[in-house]
């Protein structure tokens, strides 16, 4: 198929393709595949916004992870609310260091911030550590602060409000 015929096929069958993808992601194997994609993206720091993950390595193959994750996921009746978690936050992604947690439990998990000096927070936009008072609070983040400093958030709002 040429690119244009693939595009026409996708446009014509978009709803059916998306429905099948969503159904697959609700299966243990589909959820495991999605988790693998997230793990590798985080470890490779593909978008460059998470400096704290630059040291993290994936010490398993895709097949090993999928096999482990499917066995673990089959223990649960609902897969929507589950996430992958490293037992030791400073450890690598390897089977012995992984567990499945609900999203709420994973958010509540108290992880030590190994990267920012005490009293400082990393700004994803500035790419620098700044004093905590330069950030708005955010109870859902591990650090307790938003990912952009107040100045970067202000600049971002000006750009998006145009």
Image (cartoon, rainbow, N blue to C red):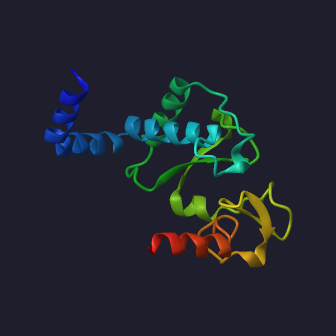
State whether residue 84 is above or below residue 116.
Answer: above
Q: Is residue 1 left or right of residue 107?
A: left
State whether residue 82 is above or below residue 57.
Answer: below
Label count reads 0
Q: Is residue 20 left or right of residue 152?
A: left
Residue furthest to the top in view is: 1
Residue 26 position, x and y percent, is: 34, 45
Residue that appears at 60% across and 43% down: 42
User: 110 or 53, which is in the foreground?
Assistant: 53
Residue furthest to the right in view is: 118
Residue 116 position, x and y percent, is: 81, 60
Residue furthest to the left in view is: 12
Residue 76 position, x and y percent, is: 43, 48
Q: Is residue 18 left or right of residue 57?
A: left
Q: Quadrant of residue 53?
A: top right
Residue that appears at 59% across and 41% down: 46
Residue that appears at 52% across and 42% down: 38
Quadrant (top left, top right, bottom left, bottom right) of the N terminus: top left
Quadrant (top left, top right, bottom left, bottom right) of the C terminus: bottom left
Q: Quadrant of residue 14?
A: top left
Residue 134 position, x and y percent, is: 74, 76
User: 16 or 91, which is in the foreground?
Assistant: 16
User: 48 or 143, which is in the foreground?
Assistant: 48
Residue that appears at 55% across and 69% down: 156
Q: Is residue 29 left or right of residue 130?
A: left
State whether residue 17 is above or below residue 106.
Answer: above
């Amino acid at each position: 198929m040429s690119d244009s015929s693939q595009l026409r096929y996708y446009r014509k069958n978009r709803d059916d393709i998306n429905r099948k993808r969503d159904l697959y992601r609700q299966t243990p194997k589909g959820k495991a595949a999605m988790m693998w994609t997230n793990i590798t993206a985080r470890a490779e720091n593909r978008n460059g916004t998470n400096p704290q993950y630059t040291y993290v390595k994936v010490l398993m193959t895709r097949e090993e992870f999928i096999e482990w994750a499917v066995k673990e996921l089959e223990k649960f009746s609902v897969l929507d609310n589950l996430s992958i978690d490293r037992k030791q936050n400073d450890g690598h992604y390897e089977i012995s260091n992984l567990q499945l947690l609900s999203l709420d439990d994973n958010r509540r998990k108290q992880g030590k911030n190994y990267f920012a000096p005490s009293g400082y927070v990393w700004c994803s936009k500035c790419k620098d550590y700044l004093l905590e008072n330069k950030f708005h609070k955010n109870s859902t983040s591990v650090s307790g602060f938003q990912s952009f400093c107040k100045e970067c958030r202000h600049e971002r709002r000006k750009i998006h409000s145009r």
